[in-house]
Every structure is written in structure tokens, then in C-alpha cells.
Image: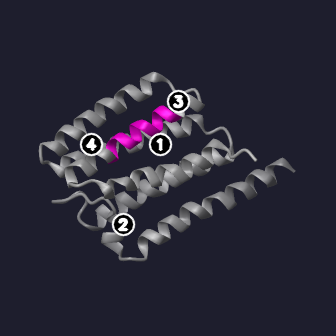
Amino acid sequence: MKVHPAIWFALGTPIALNFYRAMPSGELARVWYVWVFVAVAILLSRIKPVPDAAISPMVLIAMAASAASLGGDAQLSRLIYGLNIVALLCIVWRIADDWLWLGYFSGGVIELSMFLLGNANRGTFGPEVAYSAIGQAYGPWAMPASFLAMIAVYPVLWYNQRANKV
């Protein structure tokens, strides 16, 4: 049984991003986090036609965020790598040609909105921009709720896709 690439990306991206927890310092964790988005975009370019012009700015953003992080400015680093999250979402939206890729895109939109909602509740990018801002701002139920929302997108998209074929 062949598994659709969108499923591999939907499962693999959060796992790869969470390897930041294994880094020995916060600076390296932020560097890891920003470069994972670049790696995912490069992997997507091996499966779907992604313009090189979309990946080059992501590399520049990753370099800037890495420099800010290694320079000790965590807030600037997190704000900069937010641009790579948006860039990856734009790439996925461009390649989304079936409901599984739309599910992967929807998961990214949910994650971005959770980040923004959590930081807005903390004071809209106040003194510190958090990684898991939704959990820190709304309590321990918020992160599982966002993951459940990401999972719930797939049955809804499958149902709509199936209903449109009839």
C-alpha cells in the first residue's frame, strides 16, 4: 500500500519540528526550528513543482533568524522565522491539488493561528514571543485542542471531496 506524500508530510513535519527539544540550548533550538521549514520546502520541491524563487528567500530568512538567535535576540529570531512559516504555507497552498494536500495546508494554518492567538493573548508580541504560545496563554487544554482540530480537518475534507464526486 502506497501512502500519499501529503500524509508523510503531515506526520513528519511536526515530528521534525519537535526535535528542537533535543537541542542543548535555546539558541540551537531556534536555529533548528527555522531550518526545518527550509528542509520541508526543499523536500516538497522534490515531489511537486516548487519554484526555486520560493525557497531562496526562505534560506535568507533562516540565515537572518539564525544570526539573531545566535546573537542572543530570541524575540527577533522568533519573529523572523514566522516569515518562513508563512512562506511554507504559501508553497503548500500553491501545490495543493487534492484534499490531502489541503489537509496539510489546513494543519499549518491552524498551527499559525494558534501561535498568533497565543501571542495576542500574551500582549501581541510583547516582551517575549513564545514557541507554544497557545498552551502558555490558554492553558494545558489548548495544545491538544489544536492537534484535534488538525486531525478533524481530514474527515471534513474527505467528506467534501467524496460528496463533490457524486
Which residue occupies the extreme bottom position in the image?
140
Residue 75, horizontal then vertical, whole percent: 19, 52
Q: Which residue is mark 2?
A: 134
Residue 109, horizontal then vertical, whole percent: 48, 52
Q: Which residue is mark 1?
A: 89
Mark carried by residue 80:
4
Q: Residue at x 53, y 35 (%)?
A: 44
**Alpha carbons under labels 4 and 3: distance apart:** 22 Å
Residue flagged by tag 1: what amino acid is it? Answer: Leu
Residue flagged by tag 2: what amino acid is it? Answer: Ile
Q: Mark 3 near mark 2, Cβ–Cβ under 8 Å?
A: no
Q: Is residue 57 visible?
A: yes
Neighbours of disc 4 within 10 Å: few (<14), some (14-19), many (20+): many
**Alpha carbons under labels 4 and 2: distance apart:** 19 Å
As drawn, 41 above or below 49:
below
In the image, taking residue 69 as reference, residue 33 lies left or right, namely: right
Residue 150, horizontal then vertical, whole percent: 55, 60
Q: Residue at x 65, y 48 (%)?
A: 100
As drawn, 162 above or below 149:
above
Q: Which residue is mark 3?
A: 45
Neighbours of disc 1 within 10 Å: few (<14), some (14-19), many (20+): many
Span of residues in magenta: 33-43
As drawn, 85 above or below 18:
above
